[in-house]
Amino acid sequence: MDAVLAFGAALVALRLAGELVRRRRLAWAGGLFAYAAAGATLAWGTAHGWDSRSFRVYYLAGGLLTATLLGAGSLLLTGRRWAAPVALLYTGLAVGVVVAMPVHGSFAGGGVPTAGKHLGWLPQAVAIGGNSLGTVALAGVALLTIRRRPLGNVLLLVGITVAALGSGLAGSSVITLALSTAVAAGLLYLGVSSVSARND
């Protein structure tokens, strides 16, 4: 049942990402595609067992890319064109980190693996830095423009909060992660759609 919920959350995020591609909100779409990949890997790891390969994909998508790409999307909406090449460079760095990072420890058990048990300090520092900057960018743009686009920005703020709380409070609970992924993806999509409509 846990794997089914995780797969359902991945499908929700994937469907919403496709809609954002259609609207040409590519950085935001990339963030939701990464969210979908993290959900799909969560389903795979839950159903078939975790290993270093599935953990690398999960860490890249959920730990390194999602928040950063969503933040870049917010900056691009405000005309900060430099955010696109920075996001591309960071994505390349994140892929390089995940390919090169040593993964240690056993993946026995049914819980979701955590970075602290399997990774050294550098991949964790990159994830903390990318997530922090992406979250600050998204929240900062939302707060600065909340008077012009109140509904969309409130939805974005609630969506990023649900995503952060889901990751922070879930521990190894697949159900909590899957539900928070689906809810956060829906809120982020609605927020992006509302904000984008006001800027088109």
Image (cartoon, rainbow, N blue to C red):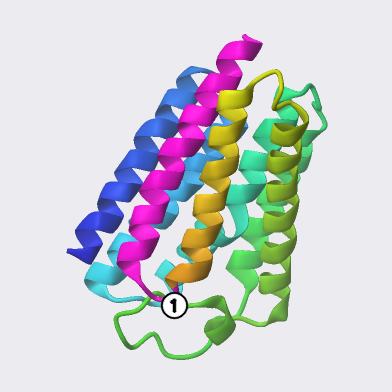
How many other residues sit within 10 Å of disc 1, few (<14), some (14-19) or many (≥20)?
many
Three-letter residue code for mark 1? Pro
Quarter occupied by residue 129: bottom right
Horizontally, residue 48 falls left or right of residue 121, namely: left
Locate residue 35 relative to residue 9 in the image: left or right. Answer: right
In this view, 19 is above or below 17: above
Give the residue furthest to the top. 200
Tell me what residue is drawn at x 53 percent, y 68 percent. 168
Percent x, y for residue 112? Answer: 39, 74
Under tag 1, what secondary structure? loop
Front in this rendered view, residue 125 or 157: 157
State the count of labels. Answer: 1
Q: Is residue 173 magenta?
A: yes
Q: Is residue 77 above or below residue 70?
A: above
The spot of residue 4 in percent (x, y) is: 20, 57
Residue 1 in the image: x percent, y percent? 17, 63
Left or right side of 199 for 39: left
Compared to residue 129, the image places residue 100 above or below, namely: below
Front in this rendered view, residue 156 or 131: 156
- Range shown magenta: 171-200
Reply yes or no: does residue 140 show up in magenta.
Answer: no
Q: Residue at x 53, y 87 (%)?
A: 104
Which residue lies at the image location 49% right of the left edge and 26% below the top edge?
20
Residue 29 is left or right of residue 136, and the answer is left
Circle 1 residue: 113
Residue 200 makes an appearance in the image: yes
Residue 102 appears in which quarter of the rendering?
A: bottom right
Picture quarter with the C terminus: top right
Looking at the image, which is closer to me, 190 or 39?
Answer: 190
Question: Do we see residue 41 in this rendering?
Answer: no
Magenta part, dominant SS: helix
Question: Residue 119 at x, y = what percent?
Answer: 60, 81
